[in-house]
Amino acid sequence: MSEKTAAVVGSGIVGTAIAHYLVNRGYRVDVFEKGPEYPYPHRQPFTERTYYRYVNPAYTLPPTIRDLEYSGDYAKNPDDERFMRVGGSATRWQALTLRMLPNDFRTRSLYGHGNDWPLDYADLEPYYCAAEGLLGVSGTDADNPFAPPRSRPYPLPQFDLSYGDGLIAEKLRAAGIVLHTTPQARTRQAYDGRPACQNFGMCTVCPIGARYSPNHHLAATIATGRCRLHTNTSVRRIIVDGAGRAKSLLCQGNDAATPTEHAAQVIVVACGAIESVRLLLLSADGPRPEGIGNDAGHLGKHFVFHHTWYGELQYRTSLYPARFGGATGQSCQFLDPPGRGTHGGVKIEFSATTEYHKLREIRTVGNRAAIAAQLRPILHWHPLAMHSESAPSPGKYVSLSRRRDRFGDPFPYVHYQSAEFDQATERYARELFDRFATITGANERSFPRNYDSAAHHMGGCRMGASVRDSVVDSYGRVHGTSNLFVAGGSTFVGTSGAVNPTLTMVALALRTADFIDHQVS
Amino acid sequence: MNRPAPQARTSRRRFLQLLGVCALGGFFAAWLLRSRLWNVAAKMVAVARQRTDPVLAPTAPGALSAGTLQTLEAVTLTLVDTPVEMSHYVGYFQWRAGNIAGYRDLYEECARGLDEAASRAAGLSFSRCDRDVRLRILGRVDLSRSGIRTVAMNLYDRSWIRFEQYVVREILALFVRTDGWVLLGYETWPGTPRGLDSYTQPPRAHRSAA
């Protein structure tokens, strides 16, 4: 019997989860990563960033290899939100791992916005459990009456509320609002070869691996000898035969003169929402002139961000922020509010993490008392983020730019224009923000003018029941092909409600890998 | 019969002249935007900015002399006026000098300048002067200087602007992220392993107040 082989494009949290799963079931897997190596545990990047305030250019790709063109009303460059290197964007993330609500899968039927997913919460629930096990999620639902049902407890106990979050929670409770602990892929206790969190605090780059990084499982997968990682290698095309079978990948080292072809029995594209769309578009051929999976013109459409407003509140009492690096207090009470459909749901993030915290500049030097006076306001400010659902609309899409990379391939083009639904969501988020500020007795408040995507890029290769309405099926298999899969946020039908998308991405990835193992091979 | 007021006739003419100038200006601006001249103008702006930015010369990284390190330590203590974990700052200076082009020469040059000033003021090196002398020498540090004044000063006293930007501001930025928290009563600062027992309470120094 011949060996089962798979090729995975992208070494991020999704590509790694699939490679890890398949290798453990006897596959030989090649993982292709456009970006450079990234040391794990991330001690070196952590030290450079925290101790030497240095952003090492060795961890980024040159603009001849990665870039994108963008337009619309999103104020930031979406390219800055992608970390293209070994481990992908989950080498630096907040690691908040919430599940979508059952209703988030049926927004069209229930509320009239977005579209229904071709699977429901019950289909995904076992994979949510598996994903929580893989990432080592610490959490509890005991204090969160809005959490969806679960068949297994969290693998690790929760991180308690910080002192400041505790004070806020008391005030909110009196007004009937629940501020609860937050499930997160951060080890409350040692787990699966990772040490317990020591609260270094600069958690987006964890020096010890307590905060989950895909590099943990990628290293273990490579150590089996059945997985090869190809770094600094761009996948330029997927070659599909006339019968719809993906034969191989056309790959090229970022500095190489010529491409090479890599054949595999199964091909999985897991390189982020934007690059996944780009690769399928670039792979257009005779029978598929508009790109693979694009027979009905859905490729690149239905692309969405979460819309997040990072506000701040100031209190007379000191809340002592930045004493814990992760997020502790959140509220899921407004994920599925009355009025949903005219606007989106909102998740409230009330955590005073180190990373969100606004540091003050010193203007006067040489006087201890004056310096302390300049710094002291830090103790009284508390961030309040409104993390909101969005919905696909015609003004949000990914296509190809006229600008090209060093191989002559077009870069991606992102157009993102928020719609009336988003403006209604912003009004709702502002109302909630003001309500929270009033209930908790804030003296001052600041709500930002612009929304932030929270680096949550979703859609573009959305899943659906048929080629008429989507690019892939619920397992991520590209319509019209037998062995080509897309995995990750790009297959989302809309946003993941108002919760962080990563746990859902990993759960879907494990479902895809399970399907490949049982059905395809 | 009253003749029309001359002022009104002039105003109309001036209005038309203004309209003509605006139209010409708009046409020229549109043409400039579409033409290569735009690139030339952008390059000129870039060159001007480069000339007025206190960028570091890309000289080779390398080890710092002991004297320079002592001067930088003295600068740190004078600026922040509070006990700090000095090894952290020393590590910062050494790492940047050893890894980033321009920093070694910048630190050595700044130390020389401060030592010369100290020698003129007190006949000693900067690190051996008493605090008042050091404060007098650093009295020129102005972190609220306007952008235009900084640009102007950069033309005739670039080394001081570099000192402010790459030494003073970086020391303070490091302080704010580390010992600044200790100054506010925290036991330690983010970036050190702090354990999971104490973050649910105020820092020890503040517990009675809370």
Image: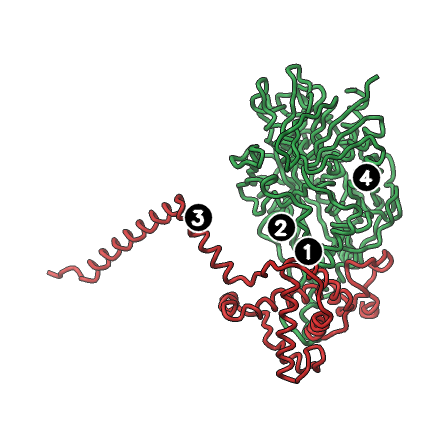
Chain colours: A green, B red
Q: Which amino acid is tagged 1?
A: Tyr
On the question of residue A252 being in view, the answer is yes
Query: Of circles 3 and 2, which is in front?
Result: 3
Q: From the viewer's perspective, is the residue at label 1 or at label 2 nearer?
A: 1
On the same chain, marks 3 and 2? The answer is no
Q: Earlier in the sequence, mark 1 or mark 2?
A: 1
What amino acid does circle 4 point to?
Answer: Ala
Residue at the extreme left: B1
Q: Which residue is mark 2?
A: A430
Farthest residue, direction bottom: B122
- The crowding category of the residue bearing disc 4, from other C-alpha atoms within 10 Å (few below 14, some 14 to 19, many at least 20), is some
Residue A13 lies, in percent from the top left, at 75, 38
Dot 1 falls on a residue whose secondary structure is loop
Which residue position holds label 3? B39
Instruction: Say which residue label 1 marks.
Output: A54
For the residue labelled by badge 3, is the local secondary structure a helix, a strand or a loop?
helix
Q: Are marks 3 and 1 in contact (CB under 8 Å)?
A: no
Contact? badges 3 and 4 (CB < 8 Å)? no
Q: Is there CB contact under 8 Å for labels 3 and 2?
A: no
Q: Quadrant of residue B125?
A: bottom right
Q: CA distance from mark 1 to mark 2?
A: 36 Å
Mark 4 lies on residue: A219
Helix, strand or loop for disc 2: helix
Q: Chain of mark 4?
A: A
Nearer-N-terminus badge (4/1): 1
Disc 4 or disc 2, which is closer to the eye? 4
| Amino acid identity at mark 2 | Arg
Q: CA distance from mark 3 to mark 2?
A: 42 Å
Q: Residue A32's image quarter?
A: top right
